[in-house]
Image: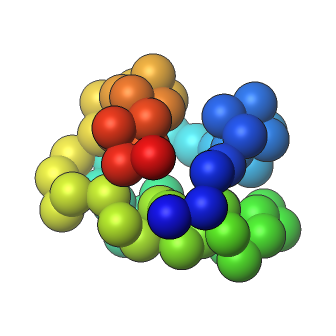
Amino acid sequence: MAKVNPVQLQKHLKSMDYPTSKQDIVDYAKQQGADDRAIAVLEELAEEEYETSTDVNKAVGELQ
């Protein structure tokens, strides 16, 4: 799986309201202009509720 820069990822998710679902994270990142690589990684996240942006970063880090 391609690596995603966590700083860039958070740039696309910075105004995201938490807690939120995986699908909402993917949709929001798309709306914010995240690239295909970042979207592909987000789509690999577990189907669960994410409480904070830190939770998203941790989950992405475990995938890579």
For residue 41, say whether it is visible: yes
Where 30 sits versus 38, above or below? below
Q: Is residue 58 left or right of residue 1?
A: left
Q: How far from the left and from the top, in percent, is residue 51?
A: 30, 30
The answer to which quarter of the image holds residue 60 is top left
Q: Nearer the viewer, residue 4 or 7?
A: 4
- Whether residue 14 is visible: no
Tell me residue 13's x, y (percent). 65, 44
Q: Give the total of numbered labels.
A: 0
Quadrant assignment, res 30: bottom right
30 with respect to 24 (left or right): right
Report x, y in % for residue 29.
65, 62
> What residue is shown at x 72% (from left), y 40% (from top)?
5
Q: Is residue 47 above or below residue 31?
A: above
The type of colouring in the image is rainbow
Q: Give the x, y percent position of residue 64.
A: 45, 46
Residue found at x 59% / y 70%: 39
Query: Splitting the image into 4 quarters, where does residue 47 fall?
Result: bottom left
In this rendering, would 51 be left or right of 27? Answer: left
**Compared with residue 5, is residue 47 higher up or lower down, i.e. above or below?**
below
Q: Residue at x 67, y 69 (%)?
A: 37
51 shown above or below 63: above
- Which residue occupies 21% across, 46% down? 49
Pick the residue in front: 46 or 21: 46
In this rendering, would 16 be left or right of 44?
right
